[in-house]
Image (cartoon, rainbow, N blue to C red):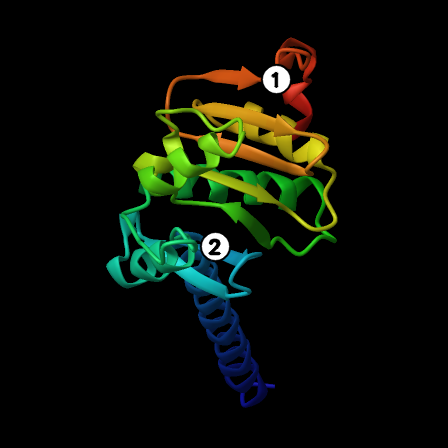
Amino acid sequence: MNGTRPKMQRNATGIASALTLGCALAFNTASAAAAEQSLHLHNLHTKETINVVYKRDGKYVPAGLKQINHLLRDHRRNEETQINPKTLDRLYDIGQTVKRNYPSIAIKFEIISGYRALQTNNALIAAGGSQGKDSQHTHGNAIDFRIPGVRTETSRDVAWCTGSGGVGYYKQDGFVHIDTARKRFWPANWNPAHVNCAKFK
């Protein structure tokens, strides 16, 4: 018996050490994943797709932002600008909220519009479009998107509940607009007061 107990103790110690190491590795992996914020984007006009980390440990990743700026460029003029990182944070928060509430859906943002050069914006207005003369798209502050498998109304409500900027709802065209300007909404026949934001917490 005296010879067996130390061996059992050594085995138990070894198992405990292995479990501790395993837990530490799992924790570190989870922490690393949580510290990285990535966006899966598909430009419907250029057919380009990226899945890129744009923020790590609370700091923006220049290489990731550069890829996003390129994908969200004005495709008509092939012109880029610096997309407001806060707009990307809004998009990320929307994706995470949808993921929590609809875990079976793979979050990929289909981009209708990102940056829009002033010349492009003016041309669209002249052609009869409803674009604003000082559109947030021309400042790199806005993104129009949809998420495959998610109703446009749901994306709209999540966008309203998770952010402090503007939310536009384009029902017939099937997309949502977000920006980092003041809190506001359109069209007028949609009333955010009726949105139950508590269900998206």
Q: Which mark is residue 160?
A: none
Q: Position of residue 188 (x, y in %)?
A: 62, 11
Q: Position of residue 175 (x, y in %)?
A: 63, 38
Residue displayed at 62% across by 53% down = 107
The residue lying toward the viewer, choosing from 114 and 13, is 114
The residue lying toward the viewer, choosing from 183 and 11, is 183
Q: Is residue 47 toward the left or the right of residue 115 in the image?
A: right
Q: Amino acid at mark 2?
A: Leu
Q: N-terminal of the two: label 2 or label 1?
A: 2
Q: Is residue 196 toward the left or the right of residue 21 in the image?
A: right
Residue displayed at 55% across by 38% down = 94
Q: Amino acid at mark 1?
A: Pro
Q: Quadrant of residue 146?
A: top right
Q: Is residue 148 toward the left or the right of residue 71 in the image?
A: right
The residue lying toward the viewer, choosing from 6 and 196, is 196
- In what quadrant of the picture does the C terminus appear? top right
Q: Which mark is residue 39?
A: 2
Q: Residues within 10 Å of mark 2 (few under 14, many from 20)?
A: many
Q: Secondary structure at mark 1?
A: loop
Q: Which mark is residue 187?
A: 1
Above or below for 5 versus 127: below
Q: Secondary structure at mark 2?
A: strand
Residue displayed at 27% across by 47% down = 82
- In what quadrant of the picture does the N terminus appear? bottom right
Cα distance in 3D space between marks 2 and 1: 27 Å
Q: Nearer the viewer, mark 2 or mark 1?
A: 1
Q: Number of marks in the image? A: 2
Q: Quadrant of residue 42?
A: bottom right
Q: Residues within 10 Å of mark 1 (few under 14, many from 20)?
A: few
Q: Position of residue 103 (x, y in %)?
A: 70, 49
